[in-house]
Amino acid sequence: MTTTKTALVTGASSGIGEAAALKLHAAGYTVYAAARRTDRLRTLADRGIRPLGMDVTDDDSMRAGVDRIIADTGRIDVLVNNAGYGSYGAVEDVPLSEARYQFEVNVFGAMRLAQLALPHMRAQHSGAIINVTSMGGKIHTPLGGWYHGTKFALEALSDCLRMEAKPFGIDVVVIEPGGIKTEWGAIAADALRKASSDGAYVKQADAVADSLTSEANAKRLSSPQVIADAIVKATTVRRPKTRYATGFGARPMMTLRRILPDRAFDAFISRATGLPRN
């Protein structure tokens, strides 16, 4: 067994996952960067990070990935559950098959990897599970119901897991990004236009898709590096916080949600996203 700590980062082909893999590697971890398409991991491989083909909706793929890490290093110290995407569209419009897939990627994949990593972490009596949720796990926006549902679920599961894992010396930490410069907004907007491009919700869909991809919004977004910094901090301090909210808008938006009544927050979000009044 190696004495160098080992980290697994999912969704590492770009954005937050890529930045986190690089930051953990710089901090001295042996890092396995997981993604479905390993060709997109070449840049990380060139930096000494170990690429790992993994589909977080496929149990055999996840099991094989964790088994490889244990076979190579004998340990797993950090699991960063970052893989995820935003499937937008009116709740009525999004096919249940897509809604289920959203939960498979954003929730069940993360929790299955936690299940696979936990026995090894318990044996070590140490470890950290870092679940990347979103400010969208604490607030709501129109036409994002299925996405928000996954993030709310991951927040709740993380809270329960934190209490369960504590006696074994394992930390469970939630990272709540705000607006970050990644492919996420364009992917969510594309899904939204596909799901609700006509019919009863078309005006709302146009407004929300435009807000997700507007140049003005893009200029305000934070670098993925700020999330990577939070992830590494959570893995290196003796007693990490249970949550790290960072990135554009995260703290103010979550504060507004706490203090405003439901309908007042609804009205604020409607104005911010440019929803039609009628």
Image (tube, helix red, strand yellow):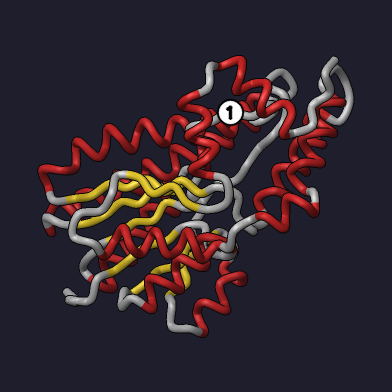
Q: Residue at x 50, y 68 (%)?
A: 19
Instruction: Inspect the image, locate mark 1, and give the three-letter code of the amino acid beneath it.
Output: His
Please state, as top left, top right, bottom left or bottom right, where the N terminus lies in the image: bottom left
For image coordinates 69% across by 48% down, the residue present is 185
Counting the numbered discs, the total is 1
Residue 243 is left or right of residue 259, and the answer is: left
Q: Circle 1 is placed at which residue position?
A: 140
Q: Quadrant of residue 146?
A: top right
Locate residue 224, reporting x and y percent.
55, 62
> Quarter holding the C terminus?
top right
Tag 1: Cα neighbours inside 10 Å, few (<14), some, or many (≥20)? some
Residue 242 sits above or below residue 204 on the image: below
The residue at the point 64 percent across, 58 percent down is 182
Instruction: Name the residue located 56 percent from the left edge and 16 percent from the top edge.
Output: 262
Residue 180: image x %, image y %?
60, 55
Q: Residue furthest right?
A: 198
Position of residue 63 measured from the top left corner of the image (x, y, whole percent): 36, 53
- Please, what secondary structure does the residue beneath circle 1 have? loop
Instruction: Pinpoint residue 241: horizontal percent, then vertical percent.
Output: 28, 49
- Observer-nearest residue: 268 or 103? 268
Q: Is residue 126 left or right of residue 232?
A: left
Give the camera-side residue of 245 and 54. Answer: 245
Judging depth in this view, the residue of 166 and 125 nearest the camera is 166
